[in-house]
Image (cartoon, rainbow, N blue to C red):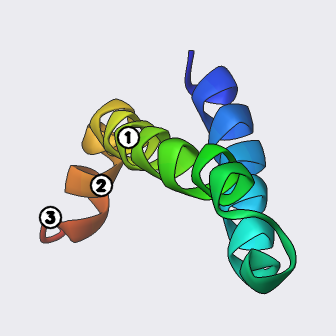
């Protein structure tokens, strides 16, 4: 599950970053489809990534015993 989330996160980030850089070169409708809509799914994927890695994050930030 985490590998699939990471893969989707990677490709979604590339899509959002590329469409953001080429904003001036593409139409507004295409921009919405390639940047705004995937941007919302990028947020959901980041949340899922953090939830699935919550144990590791807690372990990293907990004081050593």
30 relative position to 42: left or right: right
The residue that label 3 is drawn on is 62
Element carrying mark 3: loop
Foreground disc of the pair 1, 3:
1
User: N-terminal of the two: label 3 or label 2?
Assistant: 2
Per the model, the C-alpha gap separating discs 2 and 1 is 6 Å
Cβ–Cβ below 8 Å for labels 2 and 1? yes
51 relative position to 9: left or right: left
Q: Which residue is more in the foreground, 51 or 23?
A: 23
Q: Quarter of the image containing the N terminus?
A: top right
Q: Quadrant of residue 22?
A: bottom right
Density class for disc 2 (Cα within 10 Å; few <14, some 14-19, many ≥20) is few
The residue that label 1 is drawn on is 53
Density class for disc 3 (Cα within 10 Å; few <14, some 14-19, many ≥20) is few
Q: Quarter of the image containing the C terminus?
A: bottom left
The residue that label 2 is drawn on is 57
Per the model, the C-alpha gap separating discs 1 and 3 is 14 Å
39 relative position to 4: left or right: left
């Amino acid at each position: 599950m985490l590998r699939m989330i990471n893969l989707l996160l990677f490709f979604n980030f590339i899509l959002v970053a590329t469409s953001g850089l080429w904003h001036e070169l593409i139409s507004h409708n295409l921009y919405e489809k390639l940047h705004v809509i995937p941007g919302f799914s990028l947020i959901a994927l980041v949340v899922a990534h953090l939830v699935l890695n919550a144990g590791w994050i807690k372990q990293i930030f907990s004081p050593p015993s």
